[in-house]
Image: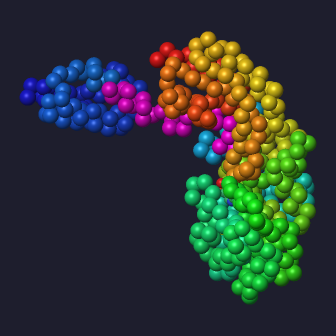
Amino acid sequence: MFLLKSIPKVDKFIKNKKFDDLASSLLVSITQEVLQNLRENILNKSVESFSEEELVQIVLEKYKALTQPSLQKLINATGVIVHTNLGRSLIDPKTFDKVKELVTGYNNLEYDIAKGKRGERYSHISDVICRVLGCEDVLIVNNNASAVFLILNTFAKKKEVIVSRGELVEIGGSFRIPNVMKESGAKLVEVGTTNKTHLRDYEENISKKTSMLMKVHKSNYSIEGFSSEVEFKELVRLAKENNLIDYYDMGSGHLIDLPYGLDKYEPSVLKYMQENPSLLSFSGDKLLGSVQAGIIVGKKEYIAKLKKNQLLRMLRVDKLTLALLEESITAILLNKTDQIPTLRMLFTSTDTLRENALALHQEIQDICECEIIQTKTVIGGGTTPNRTIPSIAVTIKIKNYKQNKIEKLFRERKIIGRIENDKFLLDFRTIQKSEIIQIINTVKEITNV
Ligand SMILES: *Cc1c(COP(=O)(O)O)cnc(C)c1O
């Protein structure tokens, strides 16, 4: 009873000097919870004494945990470059600095400086993209999923869209093409079989209700063996003959074939534009290596219709996205791939990766069992599912810990590695040079635990 009575009163307790800089509403809510827990624990006899100082400490810790940002920086040592769970493509710090100036001040987002009146949000990057790709117009939306939805809703609501069965994919985060179509109001007409679809399958299913022939990039899976699909250029031709719209959801797109040979992974948007398609869409943060966005390119008359759809207001992008995208696209066009981390990582030579791995290995070889190995990784983000790229990794074994335990110890310290052939490893394809020091310190810390 005595203990219950000595529980401090909330309003008095929160006057403690140690709480001086804290926001009072949050402080009150945490204090109430802590004191309520204390009361319960006294009643069920799990607490037999306490001090006010202890309570203050508990409240301070809870306050700190609650006010810490939940998004945190991680080291991606999985080797997967466009890792959807880890934020997909990175933004180059120099690019970010340039954009910072733009978005921390007012700007001409929707203002025409020459005319002194309202301008168009989407005009900013369209000129340069149109010039490079030879397309008539461009529209940027929130992400590629939005692009798919907006296009289907605008042109195929209550109408039919013909898609190959082999392309009705589900990509990460349960984005399923058939479901998205349904939500958009479009009626899906599946043609062909899972492994084979021919041009005649599309042809035979064209009816008065058909509005569009759609092709979807298979993204994260591929069909091997006895299989065939219709090339987009054939769909474009068939659509033209029948006065229909052709549309390719490319998923991960890159603009132009850079000197390194990105085309050996995926044909570029430029390549598809040569077929003179109605519409194409792709993500801003997959192979393009910029910020989350959906980029729609194609014929002016169709893009004008998309711009008139009220839905666009819900899917439109912010100045931050436009500014980052503009910077990245300019860098790509000027062939400055070092400013596009996704491309920089993809094209780093294994010799350079080995040098970086060596820098880690030298510092930790005396404190744990470690080895530099050759391995393979993937680009990720629904690009080239079966294609591996060579990489270099450092395997790490600490004490007699199992690989799962080592993985967890690293993960808890914000380094995400992977387990391969029963070994825990850090893949240097995605480790930034500036992060090596943190990895060394983490290994030291774990070996001392
Ligand atoms: C990734 C992908 C999408 C979705 O793009 P987000 O930018 O993630 O919205 C749609 N279609 C295909 C084929 C994809 O690969």
In the figure, residue 434 lies in which quadrant? Answer: top right
- The image shows residue 217 at horizontal and vertical percentages of 74, 61
Q: Is residue 115 visible?
A: no
In the figure, residue 250 lies in which quadrant? Answer: bottom right
Residue at the (74%, 53%) spot, across then down: 252
Question: Which residue, as the protein is rendered here, is positioned at the far left?
Answer: 1
Q: Is residue 161 magenta?
A: no
In depth, the one of 316 and 349 nearer the eye is: 349
Q: Is residue 306 above or below residue 293?
A: below
Residue range in magenta is 58-83
Locate residue 317 relative to residue 8 in the image: left or right: right
Q: Is residue 253 above or below residue 428?
A: below
Residue at the (67%, 26%) spot, across then down: 394
- The image shows residue 418 at horizontal and vertical percentages of 60, 35
Q: Is residue 64 magenta?
A: yes
In depth, the one of 149 and 410 nearer the eye is: 410
- The image shows residue 38 at horizontal and vertical percentages of 21, 31
In the figure, residue 244 lies in which quadrant? Answer: bottom right
Residue at the (37%, 31%) spot, across then down: 62
- The image shows residue 398 at horizontal and vertical percentages of 54, 21
Q: Is residue 366 above or below residue 199?
A: above
Q: Is residue 231 visible?
A: yes
Locate residue 11 relative to residue 330 in the image: left or right: left
According to the image, what is the colour scheme of the structure? rainbow
Residue at the (75%, 76%) spot, across then down: 212
